[in-house]
Image (spheres, coloured by chain):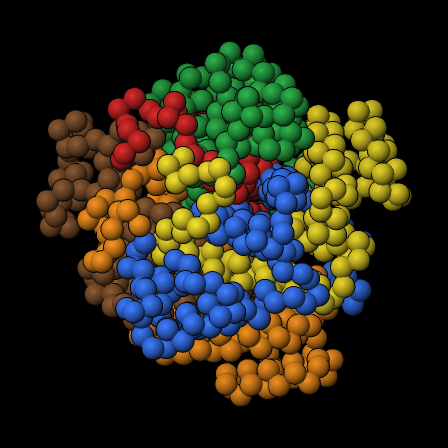
Chain colours: A orange, B brown, C yellow, D blue, E red, F green
Amino acid sequence: MATVPLLDRDAASPAAQAVFDDIKATRNVPDVNNFWKALAHDPATLKRVWEGLKQIMAPGALDPLTKEMIYIAVSATNGCSYCAHSHAAAARRSGMTPEMYAELLAVVGMANQTNALVNALQVPVDPAFLAPGTSAES
Amino acid sequence: MATVPLLDRDAASPAAQAVFDDIKATRNVPDVNNFWKALAHDPATLKRVWEGLKQIMAPGALDPLTKEMIYIAVSATNGCSYCAHSHAAAARRSGMTPEMYAELLAVVGMANQTNALVNALQVPVDPAFLAPGTSAES
Amino acid sequence: MATVPLLDRDAASPAAQAVFDDIKATRNVPDVNNFWKALAHDPATLKRVWEGLKQIMAPGALDPLTKEMIYIAVSATNGCSYCAHSHAAAARRSGMTPEMYAELLAVVGMANQTNALVNALQVPVDPAFLAPGTSAES
Amino acid sequence: MATVPLLDRDAASPAAQAVFDDIKATRNVPDVNNFWKALAHDPATLKRVWEGLKQIMAPGALDPLTKEMIYIAVSATNGCSYCAHSHAAAARRSGMTPEMYAELLAVVGMANQTNALVNALQVPVDPAFLAPGTSAES
Amino acid sequence: MATVPLLDRDAASPAAQAVFDDIKATRNVPDVNNFWKALAHDPATLKRVWEGLKQIMAPGALDPLTKEMIYIAVSATNGCSYCAHSHAAAARRSGMTPEMYAELLAVVGMANQTNALVNALQVPVDPAFLAPGTSAES
Amino acid sequence: MATVPLLDRDAASPAAQAVFDDIKATRNVPDVNNFWKALAHDPATLKRVWEGLKQIMAPGALDPLTKEMIYIAVSATNGCSYCAHSHAAAARRSGMTPEMYAELLAVVGMANQTNALVNALQVPVDPAFLAPGTSAES
């Protein structure tokens, strides 16, 4: 259950309806997902998150599938159940094969393991990791 | 500072030295990073983590650069400073351009934002997200 | 399902019953929530957590509604489903309007986004942020 | 040290300079903080994050100080060092007294404690927490 | 529901079946848990995780019950529902009494509280905490 | 640097001084750690956290060393640098050998790995994990 009612298009404000319509047109889907129906109580956030997401997830230096897989990695680390499902579905639609999903999860699991080891051991950063133009002082 | 002394090759056990040597040969580097020097107190974990990492990060269904970027995504979400530096450096060596890094971080930031919104709102999973062969019951 | 049976008042120890009674009297409610029924297996923790919570959530330099909203912010960040629900309900009882809840979640989402960007980029602290009486050295 | 060089205004692109100028004008400050100098490598994200932040942190149903305190709560939970400093500084500028800061942290600490207990015990949501218009089914 | 179908032994590959059989023999159980059935889509990860777990959870400098309790502590902090249940069950089988479980959770809750306070306050490390052979510089 | 000045005994209020004195007497140490000096701005929280900690960390169903190791596990998972150092030091004083520390970290790393895999895969809880007296319904 959600902490707010999910708003279908008919129950949403005109501002929210406009965002719903853009989501449906952009994604070529008949309805928006529950996330947007929950955000519809706040048309300003609905619009800001959708427009940010549309900008970010478009093809660019990274392809959309890579971006969806990064989304899965973050969602697994945050323990977000809805996000684990929704981005696995989106990645499959973008061409993620079962083999790619398996490798993705293997990396995510390993990264959480080594992150925990590093955080426990408080390993100091190797100077060789510094990017050109940065310094250890700042 | 680390919570344990970093062990250089000379101070490490033969079992740890063997892992150090494999890391240096596999990566073609003159020395291992601080992470491995901190793990060297526990040769069994040093060996297990290294062999797992070597297996996982090899090219497969995903290329090594994609894997390094996933590692950055997890490390940012976990707030692991060393990991943010070490995997940014590794990704750069694997060909990550500044434009790719920028897009990666944009996705990571957005994913953490929407994860938090979903976790706050406890949005129920859309049935359409279910993978073929799974069911809502289990 | 919980990892322990929820203890109703009749099944609880006298020490736990005394805490239950104080919760009901303080909050003017007919029964305690599931959280307390799960903690009742450990009367010392039940008592310590309740007394701490009662002390902390009382009006002081911050009003109770602000405190409940802070609780929601932490719960969303930790992905605690029960907590997201229970503190949304408590905040509503303390006067949180839908507009306030929407703004709260917008801030929580944005904070998780910028936290992730900062953790990825490992931005050094600006000297201007230092509080009077602190120094960069310690 | 950051994972990218911090860009001062002179080194930034015209698009980033325009955002810097808006930040300085909006906040009436002589220079932007390190966070913006690190984001300046990606003018699109710089602009999107700044404009989102400006929209969200403006007075509305919640006052700016409450919003800064929520930001501190999230930052503490995520372990973001820079964010803990920058938002403590911002909250002080917005009128947060030492007493308010102390109470805020007391709530943040308690919330992280009870979140962990709930997540360990997997306490089921009380039906009474459901918001009007939601149901246990969805 | 899982994001992949759970694979029973008959549906799993020979490589996965071999791991299933080793789990059943090692633990003397008639079937493997859902975690392994979900991992079975990726026999390499299934094998690597199981062999790592078998090595780590065997008696050594720490007894198996202590290890299961550490697992509960991490799982509660990460908000992993399945893990909170599975490791509570495993710890009970290894001899964890209700009193031990209660004390464990009390420590986990307190640790999350003080972690959050420290992360908010950004307390500098006391020099006395340094392990022999480490230094504040690295 | 901390977000507040660290208060030495002379600068602290009488209420905070009383807590400092109890810490020093209980632990038989000449001075309190930085954590307490940072909390001293809020004597109520200082007292509540210290008294809770004193109660929880005393020998009981679990010995003090086991409790310190659980504290390390939580601190590593939360990425709390100060806590990773302070509880490693405390555990060493309570008798943690290098071998025990190594095994502890191996478990913490593995737990974070499997937590992430489970959270990504959203594995449903096995009915066999249910504790006696609980049910799948609540």
Q: Looking at the image, is C32 positioned above or below residue D24?
A: above
Is residue C22 visible to the viewer in this orientation of the structure?
Answer: yes
Q: Percent x, y for residue A92?
A: 43, 72
Give the quadrant of the N terminus of chain F. top left
Q: Which residue is located at x 83 percent, y 24 percent?
A: C14
Which quadrant of the figure has residue C98?
A: bottom right
Q: Is residue E14 left or right of residue E83?
A: left
Return the residue nearer the eye: A129 or B36: A129
Which quadrant of the figure has residue A2?
A: bottom right
Q: Which residue is located at x 31 percent, y 34 percent?
A: B1
Q: Looking at the image, is F37 positioned above or below residue D7?
A: above
Q: Percent x, y for residue E33?
A: 50, 46
Q: Which residue is located at x 48 percent, y 14 percent?
A: F29
Return the residue nearer the eye: A27 or C4: A27
Q: Looking at the image, is F63 positioned above or below residue B96?
A: above
Is residue C82 visible to the viewer in this orientation of the structure?
Answer: no
Return the residue nearer the eye: F20 or B121: F20
Q: Is residue B4 left or right of residue E87?
A: left
Q: Percent x, y for residue A52?
A: 49, 74
Q: In this view, does F108 lie to the left or right of C51?
A: left
Q: Percent x, y for residue D3?
A: 30, 56
Q: Which residue is located at x 53 percent, y 63 percent?
A: C110
Q: Looking at the image, is D112 positioned above or below residue B15?
A: below
Q: Is residue C16 left or right of residue B126?
A: right
